[in-house]
Amino acid sequence: MGTCAIPAIDFSSDLMGMLDSMSDRGKQGESTVFHCSLDDFGTCGNDGVRGFAGYVASKECWDRFNFCWDEVLNYLGIEYLHTAHYLNQFPLIGDKPKSDEDDYRILEPFLRVVRGEILERGGFGVIVLTECAGYESLSNEEKMWIRPPARNSLEMLIGAVCNQVSPVLGRHNPIAFQIDETDSPDNAMEVLESYTILKKQNDLYRRSLGGICFADDTMLRPLQAADMLGNLALKGWRRHKVDKCWPIALDQAIAKDKDAVAFARAYDESILRGVVNLRRMRHQKAMQQSDIEIQ
């Protein structure tokens, strides 16, 4: 069994305060480009959730990360990490199924790179998921205010990341998103549509979102790290549903230290309804304000 004494991951709360070292602007006029590498995880049919997971860091962090990640790949004699395949193919003595502790030991070299080059240098991991049953429980009218699970998770993640790094974001310090390629062109079109809608919504997004691209995770190391986090997030979610415990590998993949609060958010039925009500109230307030201005 894995550890049950992990306070770092709380999927039920809004979590802030992730960017202690990122808040340093550096020299006057210095330009910093942040990159967020993401991968999706889960299906409504098999898992009951749709989510996105990944890491945010400066270009300098990612450059060092790439070098260290390559060193691990070369040492292990593999071209790239696809976490599910790597864990499934990793040989263990005996015929018992792999445990959470086995996952941690197998992935430990990669987790050390993430911790040393991302989490401990001002970057952070992020996980957002939406429960499919929670979305389906909404009325048709309520669904007018909420995107389907995958798009809700993506849009909430992009918005939350921009809010986290907003003190240092701007036209000269934008954030770029890269997402693993998917087999379905429809998925890519939905991602692009969500990104475009967000960029039109308000000034924070317009001045912060520097670009989005779809890339092959066999070629880009940050996407391999995002794939690892997504794999661990889905397993962690399943585990937590059973015994309220978080696997050690997930804790190591997202929490900077034992006192850090990881950036993770789950949208269940109650939270989705809360978002619906909040958006309704904002819309009504905007309409009332418009009526006042017309008068």
Image (cartoon, rainbow, N blue to C red):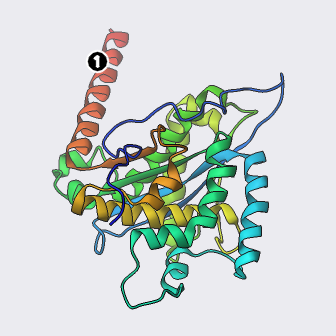
Residue 279 location (% of width, % of height): 30, 33
- From the top left corner, tell me how far across and down residue 215 is, in percent: 66, 67
Observer-nearest of 20 and 210: 20
Q: Secondary structure at mark 1?
A: helix
Q: Amino acid at mark 1?
A: Gln
On the image, the x and y values in percent for residue 216 come to 66, 72
Query: In the image, what residue occupies the spot 69% across and 38% down?
Result: 174
Q: Position of residue 91 (x, y in %)?
A: 52, 88
Return the residue nearer the eye: 75 or 24: 75
The residue labelled by disc 1 is: 288
- Is residue 289 depicted above or below 109 in this figure? above
How many labels sit on residues? 1
Quadrant of the rendered structure where residue 18 is? top right
Image quadrant in which the N terminus is located? bottom left
On the rendered structure, is 93 left or right of 72?
left
Q: Residue at x 71, y 70 (%)?
A: 72
x 30%, y 21%: residue: 285
Which corner quadrant holds the C terminus?
Answer: top left
Nearer to us in this view, 212 or 105: 105
In this orientation, does residue 148 appear? no
> Furthest-front residue in view?
93
Specify whether residue 74 is in view: yes
Give left or right: position of 288 versus 222: left
Is residue 93 shown above or below 263? below
